[in-house]
Image: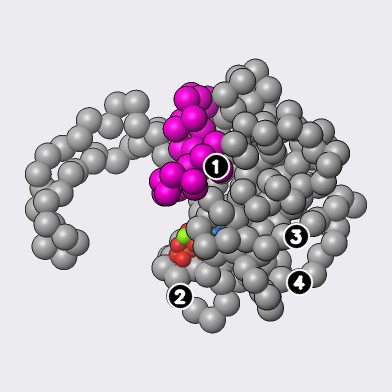
Amino acid sequence: MIWAVIPAAGRGTRFGGERPKQYLKIAGRPLIAHALDALLAHPRVAGAMVALAAGDPHWPGWHERLGKPVLTCAGGAERADSVLAALRALPAEAGEDTLVLVHDAARPNLRQPDLDRLIAAAEACEHGALLAAPVRDTLKRAYGEAGEARIAATEPRERLWRAFTPQAFRRGALTAALESALAEGVAVTDEAMAMERAGFSPALVEGREDNLKVTTPADLALMEFLLARDRD
Ligand code: CTP
Ligand code: MG
């Protein structure tokens, strides 16, 4: 059995606008529905736990989708707080060794072959696994703030990857890793970073580069195009 964990308690400050970006619609469904359904469509996934902002007026109140339970809990101030709250709120049937797939509510273009490969990798690697893609751009380190930035150096991009979601870990190990990071006040920006701090080396599974997170309005326009294409 595998459970999906969807952090959806963010406010979308970089996107702007009236409602958080995960509730903007593409092809008649909010981004969070695309994200949820991609996970629930997998035969191994038993259900989803969604972390919501307190009193979230936009949540459509789903209790199930695709015939599987959709549960909710209160998220927290940072993404790591939201994910930890969701892990703690999972039903008892999801034991310590249950694989959990943590996936951004604002990442609507996850495809089943990537999910299959991620699950296979996470089951083969005790340290867990995440979808990612190699960096392709030339990387510049700057001095000076944005607007007045000047190049200080060109950084080698060999062996640098961009971390996507889903990220797949055992429930107990990820819970302990996030608790430790939060207790020490370390800002972890993804689950893998918490696991790394705890001494693990999660596996990088090369995934589709169009599994994008919607962060800005330009991303939404691109996602509208991507989701309109033929599905595999
Ligand atoms: N998230 C969350 N709880 C938080 C912050 C973020 O559950 N306290 C979720 C978001 O809802 C999103 C995912 O984590 O699904 C990725 O975060 P991000 O893209 O940064 O979304 P926001 O935090 O909403 O956007 P911004 O940083 O621009 O405010
Ligand atoms: Mg954020």
- Classify residue 144 by image quadrant: bottom left
Does residue 57 sit above or below 179 in this rendering? below
As measured in the structure, the alpha-carbon distance from the residue carrying label 3 to the one carrying label 2 is: 24 Å
- Type of the residue with mark 3: Thr
**Do the CB atoms of the residues marked 1 and 4 lie less than 8 Å apart?**
no
Cα–Cα gap, marks 3 and 1: 19 Å
**x then y, percent, for residue 168:** 62, 35
Residue 75's place in the image compared with 176, above or below, is below
The disc placed on residue 93 is none
The residue wearing badge 2 is 16
Question: Looking at the picture, how far across and down is residue 12, in whole percent?
Answer: 50, 68
Magenta-drawn stretch contains 125: no
> Label 1: which residue?
178
Vertical side of 221 occupied by 98: above or below: above
Three-letter residue code for mark 2: Gly
Foreground mark, 1 or 4? 1
Q: Residues within 10 Å of mark 2 (few under 14, many from 20)?
A: few
Comes first in the chain, label 1 or label 2: 2
For label 1, the SS is helix
Q: Quadrant of the N terminus?
A: top right
